Amino acid sequence: MDLTFRLQLGTAVLVGLALGAILLATHRAGRASVRNALVLLLACAGAELLAGSPFAPAYPRIARVALNFASFGAGVALIRLALLTLYRLLGALRVRVVSLVEDLVTAAVLLLWIFVWLRLAGVELASLVATSAVITAVIAFAMQDTLGNILGGIVLQLDDSMRVGDWVQVDDIRGRVTDVRWRYTAIETRNRETVFVPNSALMKNRFTVIGSRNDPEVRWRRWVWFAVELGAAPSRVCEALERSVMDADIPCVSRDPRPDAVLMDVTDGCARYALRYWLRDPRADDATDSQVRAHALAALERAGIHVASRREERLVLAEDEPRRAALAAEETARRMNALQSVPLFDSLSHDERAQVARHLVHAPFLKGDVVTRQGAVAHWLYLVIDGTAEICDETDGSRRYVSSLGPGDIFGERGMLTGEPRSSTVVATTDLECYRLDKAGLAGVLRERPDIAEHMSSILAQRVAELDRLRASAAGTHAAPTARTDMLARIRAFFGLD
């Protein structure tokens, strides 16, 4: 019987050596495991030779231990090599088996082999299990962290929440999952650092998988921030930022979805914008952010938009007064030029026009804003500096287009001069930059020279008649004429000039 057993054991060793040689010759991956199994087989072969040597009868106990080691170790090594061969065959057939499953299957088969070997060795398993219940409980309590890692790895694989190849972020660690083992999950960072995270920690804490599981391509939205001076129109800034990415050939930047820019905050004397784009390769996040930022800064510079910088200034009044005076003179000149293009103020002298200019208030609007609402009472007019708007009629509940407004046009003068409610609705069709003049800004000039009201009433009557004609044309009706004398009486009464 010993001779038959040794022949079987020798056959198992030879089969294991053949499998190991094949694995070493055909696969580079996992060579360490194969070599360890081959070393164990060679040790088992040596133990078998020792048990069958001429000196064995003189030392029966040592021979028996050597034979038991050879039989048990050869089974372990042969199982390991056979399973490695099976896993490689499944890989060649494109059947994906994760490392955790390989480890669990290997552990289960080895545990089964332990029970079989003990049974063949004559050990009564029932009594062994009964007498070792307390020891098993103690071992299980001592290995609860290990069991938690094993169960965590199994759950991660079963619910498919984390896969090998996923880009993930765990706390401050960001990288690609390279392996999921029975104890840990290996994450390789962009710095070529491999971080081992216990599976139980992944089960207890939150982690982020970068990209959508429904998208075959990894696309990760990145946020690049810019601080811009408040004088720039938000629509121009957003358009310049978006075009900087769309018009540039930047590697790893996806064009679908399109990049977009949004105004996120206005604080510390500047406007904070976020340029959001989609990154195709998470490994290139910082490098791509740098290229996107460089293209965006160049685009802002070309558009004449200045990037704001946080700084602390100590102003000396003696040095600051000339600068303030220069800025004030520049703004006054701009307002004077705007008033000179308005026929309503033709009769004003230079000093009177300067007096009115001091009351102008900058009033910007965004595309789609309702600047004035028909029927509202507001005692000011608007002078368009930049952009376009539409005059609309809303008498029957629906909005009808009447006329367009552009740079140099005014509207709302009837409400400012007579106090009447707004006769039309004005809507900004683009971003609109205006100056606003209220009743108080003109009252001082009219009280000093009441004769100006006559010229203004003539201009106002013409403009009201033209607007009524356009409104009637849009509605398909006939407009009633507006008397100049009636308009003059309303102006004089509203400003108290009688």
Image: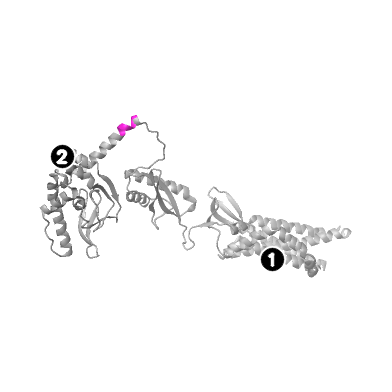
Q: Quadrant of residue 367?
A: bottom left
Which mark is in front, 1 or 2? 2
The answer to whether residue 321 is magenta is: yes
- The residue lying toward the viewer, choosing from 372 and 104, is 372
Q: Quadrant of residue 94?
A: bottom right
Q: Position of residue 351 (x, y in %)?
A: 18, 38
Q: Is residue 21 left or right of residue 239?
A: right
The answer to whether residue 5 is magenta is: no
- The residue lying toward the viewer, choosing from 378 and 278, is 378
Q: Residues within 10 Å of mark 1 (few under 14, many from 20)?
A: some
Local secondary structure at mark 2: loop
Seen as rendered, the residue at the extreme top is 318
Q: Is residue 42 left or right of residue 153?
A: right
Local secondary structure at mark 1: helix
- Is residue 84 visible to the viewer in this orientation of the structure? no
Q: Position of residue 297 (x, y in %)?
A: 38, 44
**Which label belongs to residue 109?**
1
In the image, what residue type sits under mark 1?
Answer: Val
Q: Residue at x 20, y 55 (%)?
A: 420
Q: Residues within 10 Å of mark 2 (few under 14, many from 20)?
A: few
Q: Position of residue 223 (x, y in %)?
A: 44, 51
Task: Return the residue at label 2.
Answer: 349
Q: Position of residue 439 (x, y in %)?
A: 22, 47
Q: Main secondary structure of the magenta part?
A: helix
Among numbered discs 1 and 2, the one appearing first in the sequence: 1
Q: Is residue 4 left or right of residue 310?
A: right
Is residue 149 positioned above or below 314 on the image?
Answer: below
Which stretch appears magenta?
Answer: 318-323
Is residue 345 positioned above or below 78 on the image?
Answer: above
In the image, what residue type sits under mark 2?
Answer: Ser
Q: Residue at x 33, y 32 (%)?
A: 320
